[in-house]
Image (cartoon, rainbow, N blue to C red):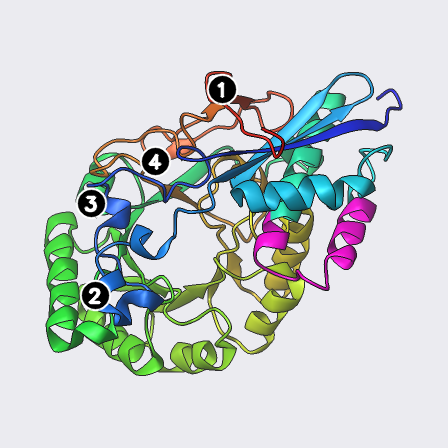
Amino acid sequence: MPATKIRAVRASFVQGGGADYHDQAQGHWIDDHIATPMAKYPDYRASRQSFGLNVLGTLVVEIEAENGVVGFAVTTGGQPAAWIVERHLSRFLIGADPTEIERIWDQMYLSTLFYGRKGLALNAISCVDLALWDLLGKLRQEPVYRLLGGAVRDELVFYATGARPDLAQKMGFIGGKLPLHHGPAEGYQGMKKNLELLAEMRSRVGPDFWLMYDCWMSLDLDYAVRLADAAHKYNLKWIEEALLPDDYWGYAELRKKVPRGMLVSTGEHEAGRWGFRMLLEMECADILQPDVGWCGGITELIKISALADAHGVLVVPHGSSVYSYHFVITRHNSPFSEYLMMAPQADKVIPMFSPLLLDEPIPENGRMKLSDAPGFGVRLNPDCPLHTLSS
């Protein structure tokens, strides 16, 4: 690979469509009375958009080398994250060797400690990191998964997250993860409705198809234990992100109290190897689910996965399209992947980050072979207008 330096860094943002998949029109299953930490307030119970889940939009980072090759990535964070990239992180990129990803990551992380560590700053760092991996793949004319050591299996296998596991089964997925609709504030009737839906789906899919519940940080320990106990007879495979992400002690207790054979998963809203180290050393989960666009990018996910592997814990990244696919296929402790059903009624398979990404692969019969296209193998859609800080 000819020597080259980074010439330019561009950060832009998009509202609606893209990595911020929560920004959907009314009637989409993804915003249909899903249990949240805010559900204790009746005014914010019916819709996650009502308390602002869709306000950030999508962040787009493009990194251009001196030879004109451009790597890019997308994640959530929108305009605030674009400001962090252009006004802060870019100083560690301009003039840098794009192969020195470890050094660049370390400088970005250490320089943002006074306001970062997790959340928006890590979203921005993650997007820069993914754009660097995309650039490196394009410079070397190799897909990212080969840069990471190569595939350990021939294809990816998926479960589906959405409102219709019964339809996901017919589409060839290995399991279906339901959003939990009712949390503790809705009392006995809410719990009853949760279990009735689970019972209905179990009757539709039969005894062997995986069913899981995504609780999206909405429960307390008592409710989570009672839900797990009651759901056991419906063969719930795992209960996901039941508690607030910083409640490591609660997760450790929950994992001890769920019925034998039921798994506990979390980590979607965790970031950095140190947070995941807490989850592992306190034995909080059987499955970790970091989002590669939020946890620190692939550079950090490598470390998180290695820690988890040493603890005998699976790593199944939160749905993040090609950015997780290229990682999962290279890791033995990531045996399957999540696919987020973005069709409004969860009744067909469509690209996750459409319309922003072109050439985005989708599973066929619940499976996918990755292409050998350089980088992550996707392109930005020129018909999607990108907004800049100066526009």
Q: Using the numbered discs, state the Cα–Cα distance from disc 3 to disc 1 in whole angstroms.
A: 29 Å
Sooner in the amino-acid sequence: mark 3 or mark 2: 3
Sooner in the amino-acid sequence: mark 3 or mark 1: 3
Label 2: element kind: loop
Residue 366 numbered tag: 4
Q: Are marks 4 and 2 in contact (CB under 8 Å)?
A: no
Question: Magenta span covers which residues?
Answer: 102-123
In the image, which is nearer the foreground, mark 3 or mark 2? 2
Residue 263: % across, % down: 38, 67
Amino acid at pointer 2: His
Identify the residue position indicated by label 2 in the image.
182
Label 4: element kind: loop
Sooner in the amino-acid sequence: mark 2 or mark 1: 2
Sooner in the amino-acid sequence: mark 4 or mark 2: 2
Residue 164 numbered tag: 3
Q: Quadrant of the N terminus?
A: top right
Amino acid at pointer 3: Arg
Sooner in the amino-acid sequence: mark 3 or mark 4: 3
Residue 358: % across, % down: 47, 21
Q: Are marks 3 and 1 in contact (CB under 8 Å)?
A: no
Sooner in the amino-acid sequence: mark 4 or mark 1: 4
Image height check: is 301 above or below 117?
Answer: above
Identify the residue position indicated by label 1 in the image.
381
In the image, which is nearer the foreground, mark 4 or mark 1? 1
